[in-house]
Image (cartoon, coloured by chain):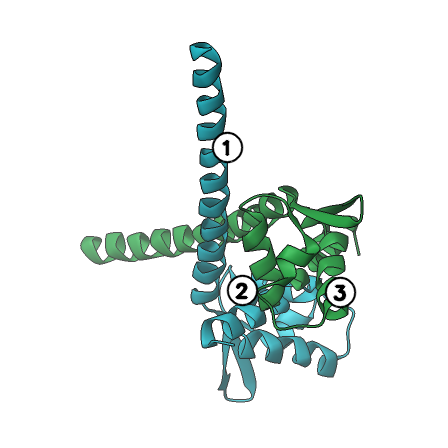
Chain colours: A green, B cyan
Amino acid sequence: MEQDARQLNGIFQAIGDHTRRAVIGQLEGGPASVSDLAKPFDMALPSFMQHIRLLEESGWIRTRKVGRVRVCAIEGQPFTLVDRWLSEQRALWEGRTDRLQQFVETINVEETQE
Amino acid sequence: MEQDARQLNGIFQAIGDHTRRAVIGQLEGGPASVSDLAKPFDMALPSFMQHIRLLEESGWIRTRKVGRVRVCAIEGQPFTLVDRWLSEQRALWEGRTDRLQQFVETINVEETQE
């Protein structure tokens, strides 16, 4: 499997979880510490850290240590890749509906000529 | 967890796999039988059927039996939901950059007034 497909797998798997989507939503507002991000969730810190790690490994966020605090920030690239995938599907779909449209028009022309 | 969140989990988990994304891509061209869909993949039919089932359960496709053949067709709703999620993230992000812009403008005004 090529690199792009593997990357896209990770990106989609990461947002297939409500907590991780919520963290992404929080980080749209600006960088935040792990402990601040964890506050809205009724979850033990080690479990929450697993979500953070998965978001980092898949490329959705970057984290860095500032003194004793780990700060997280959102990355833009996954949004671009999801958007691109969606556009590709739309193009395939429109290609199909264009062909359907041509088919319908051909039928109409044939009916008119009869 | 609410119904919407659970549905979105399933939708994203389903496309977190290269084979399933490829099946969706094939079905954009129009409905197809499971055996035709399976052809490009070097995979035993039971394994392929698991992918088909997951796509159906998550709402990406619908299937129906036509005689002895199972025919699959794409569903539009998941695309709409992925698109909506992406737009919501974009709105959050733009809200952030708007606030940053206001902050920068405030600083500039204060500097000019000094």
Q: Is residue A37 left or right of residue A97?
A: right
- Between the residue at mark 3 and the residue at mark 2, the CA separation in whole angstroms equals 35 Å
Looking at the rendered structure, the secondary structure element under dot 2 is helix
Task: Choose the circle earlier in sequence order: 1 or 2.
Answer: 2
Type of the residue with mark 2 = Leu
Q: CA distance from mark 1 to mark 3?
A: 30 Å
Name the foreground residue: A44 vs A61.
A44
Of circles 1 and 2, which is in front? Answer: 1
Q: Is residue B96 above or below residue B66?
A: above
Q: Which residue is more in the foreground, A55 or B55?
A: A55
- Which residue is drawn at the image coordinates 69% and 65% (left, top)? B19
Q: What residue is pinned by disc 2?
A: B27
Q: Residue at x 55, y 82 (%)?
A: B70
Is there a contact, CB below 8 Å, between mark 1 and mark 2? no
Q: Amino acid at mark 3?
A: Gln
Report x, y in % for residue A52: 72, 58
> Can you see residue A16?
no
Quadrant of residue B12 in the image?
bottom right
**Disc 3: CA contacts within 10 A as few (<14), some (14-19) or many (>=20):** few
Q: Is residue A29 visible?
A: yes
SS for tag 1? helix
The residue singled out by tag 1 in the image is: B100
Q: Give yes or no for contact between labels 1 and 3 (Cβ–Cβ under 8 Å).
A: no
Name the residue beneath numbered marker 3: A50
In the figure, B47 relative to B27: above or below?
Answer: below
Amino acid type at mark 1: Leu
Q: Tell me if B16 is positioned left or right of B69 in this view.
A: right
